[in-house]
Image (tube, grey):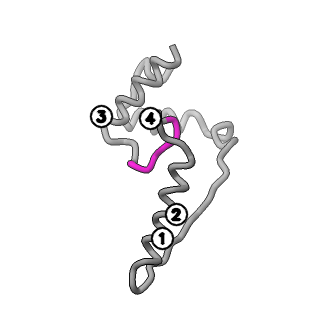
Amino acid sequence: MERIIHARIMRWLFEHNVLHFYQTAFRAGHSTVDQLFYFVQSVIDGLEERPHKKTTAVFLGLSTAFDCVWRHKLIEVLQRSGIKDNSLL
């Protein structure tokens, strides 16, 4: 059941262009290594330009973030995004 729900949510997210191109978490064939490649390529591209572009990076550790999420607000945000009714239960 979990796989079916995941597949349906992912399909909806792609159809409605909710996920950014660089979003790799929970996507088949993507991993955090992809994020590292994107970042390194961005730094290299910035260094190759004249004058050099500035590159800023922010790294956040969110391993326990979901445990701290206010679930009522999360449901509200999902509803505003178009996910409604039984999909949220």
The residue closer to the viewer here, 76 or 62, is 62
Q: Name the residue under label 2.
A: 40
Answer left or right for 16 relative to 24.
Answer: left
Q: Name the residue under label 4.
A: 78
Locate residue 63: give its quadrant.
top right
**What is the three-letter code of the residue carrying label 3?**
Glu
Q: Name the residue under label 3.
A: 15
Helix, strand or loop: magenta stretch: loop
Please state which of the two labelled residues, at mark 3 or mark 2, is closer to the viewer. 2
**What is the three-letter code of the residue carrying label 1?**
Ile
Asked whether the residues under the numbered discs 1 and 2 touch, taking CB atoms below 8 Å apart as contact, a structural biologist would say yes
Q: Position of residue 44 (x, y in %)?
A: 48, 70
Q: Mark 1 points at which residue?
A: 44
View extreme (bottom): residue: 51
View extreme (left): residue: 15
Asked whether the residues under the numbered discs 1 and 4 touch, taking CB atoms below 8 Å apart as contact, a structural biologist would say no
Q: Is 74 one of the magenta-colored residues? A: no
Q: Where is residue 76 in the image (x, y as percent from the top left)?
A: 47, 36
Q: Position of residue 46 (x, y in %)?
A: 44, 74
**What is the three-letter code of the residue carrying label 4?**
Leu
Measured along the vertical axis of the image, is residue 24 above or below residue 55?
A: above
User: Earlier along the polypeptide chain: callout 3 or callout 4?
Assistant: 3
Residue at (51%, 61%) from the top-left corner?
39
